Amino acid sequence: MTHRLHMVMGRGRRLAAYAAGEMPTVVRDRVEADLLRCPACRREVEAYQQVSHTLRTSARAVLAPDEAAAFWPGVENRIRHGTAELARAARPALRELFWDHPRLSLASAAAAVILVLGLTLSQMELWGPTVGPNGVEVLSIEAGEDAPVMVFQAPGSKLKVIWVFEKPSSS
Amino acid sequence: MGHPQELRSLAYSCIPLFCILSVILATPSVKLHAQATVSLRIQVIYAANEPGGVDSRLGGLAGDLQKTFRYSMYQLLDAPQGSAALNQAWTASLPGDRRLEIVPTAIQGGQYSLTVRVLSSGGQAVVNTAVRLRSGATVLVGGPSHQKGVLIIAITAG
């Protein structure tokens, strides 16, 4: 519990600094007093020291002459390759495409509105088969026996006429 | 997962879409209740080559009749009006014990499909036609003989 409290209060950094030996003497004495009361802090300091020791004593990488000769050309090659990758235009995600381009978003919204309006109006059946300029379309016609029938529209008139040639009667 | 603020703005942007979808879904029922009948205006005209001139009650139709036919007299005999429900027959009597029968078969986008029959006194169809009229448009059915001339029936749906 004490150790957790230490860590929360920022003493973890002080322990790391203590382990690295980068601490003024006055502070160092205070930390050592704390370490006497906190076994977990001591273990933490030991861990820091172990890591530090390992890093300092790691073997240096040694390259063979041919590896050393190929090292920089390889680095330069990778840099060139990376530059070419960056030069290629990144393909934007769909969301970025719309979010970062308000005009495109606006056009998409307008298209959606038109689509929805079209669907709405088609549901309302505000348009349908056209009926010609006079608003009349004769779809089918049948007449009685011996009664010829014709459909016509006189020039200059807007009336469409269905005319039955009925025999004169006495009515 | 998106930022809560982005999610909220996405939800707000969906509200108009839901409203529009609601309108679309509600529309067919509105249409059925609003336009289930057709108003019909009929003018039964006697046309002949007799003295008498043009009946002033024919109004704007008189000019079109004179452009279309060569009769010297046009007399309005009757002007029945009514409304017919979809697929329900509406009838009016015509001179000579004839009948006019009109059945609206479809109502679509301000246009009315009608079956129009002129029936003789024996019940036989003198003419049986299917027409589609724009609201307010008039079609003429003429030819049945009457006295010394003919009958012309002007049918207007609206």
Image (cartoon, rainbow, N blue to C red):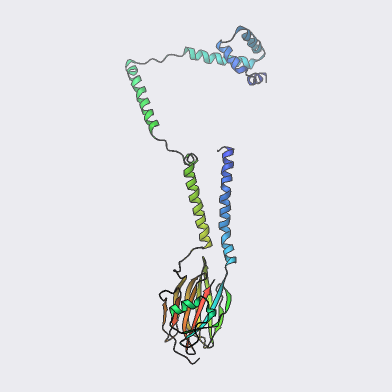
What residue is rendered at 56% in x and 50% in y?
Answer: B17
Tell me residue B45's x, y (percent). Answer: 51, 82
Tell me residue A45's x, y (percent). Answer: 59, 14
**Looking at the picture, does residue B75 appear above or below residue A76?**
below
Please tell me how many numbered marks the rendered image carries.
0
Instruction: Confirm whether residue B14 shows in the render.
Output: yes
Tell me residue A78's x, y (percent). Answer: 37, 25
Nearer the observer, A140 or A41: A140
Q: Residue furthest top?
A: A25
What residue is rendered at 58% in x and 55% in y?
Answer: B22
Nearer the observer, B76 or A50: B76
Give the quarter of the figure containing the N terminus of chain A.
top right
What residue is rendered at 58% in x and 48% in y?
Answer: B15
Instruction: Confirm whether residue B129 shows in the render.
Output: no
Nearer the observer, B27 or A168: A168
Q: In the rendered view, does A79 fall on the left or right side of B56?
A: left
Tell me residue B59's x, y (percent). Answer: 53, 77
What residue is rendered at 58% in x and 77% in y?
Answer: B81
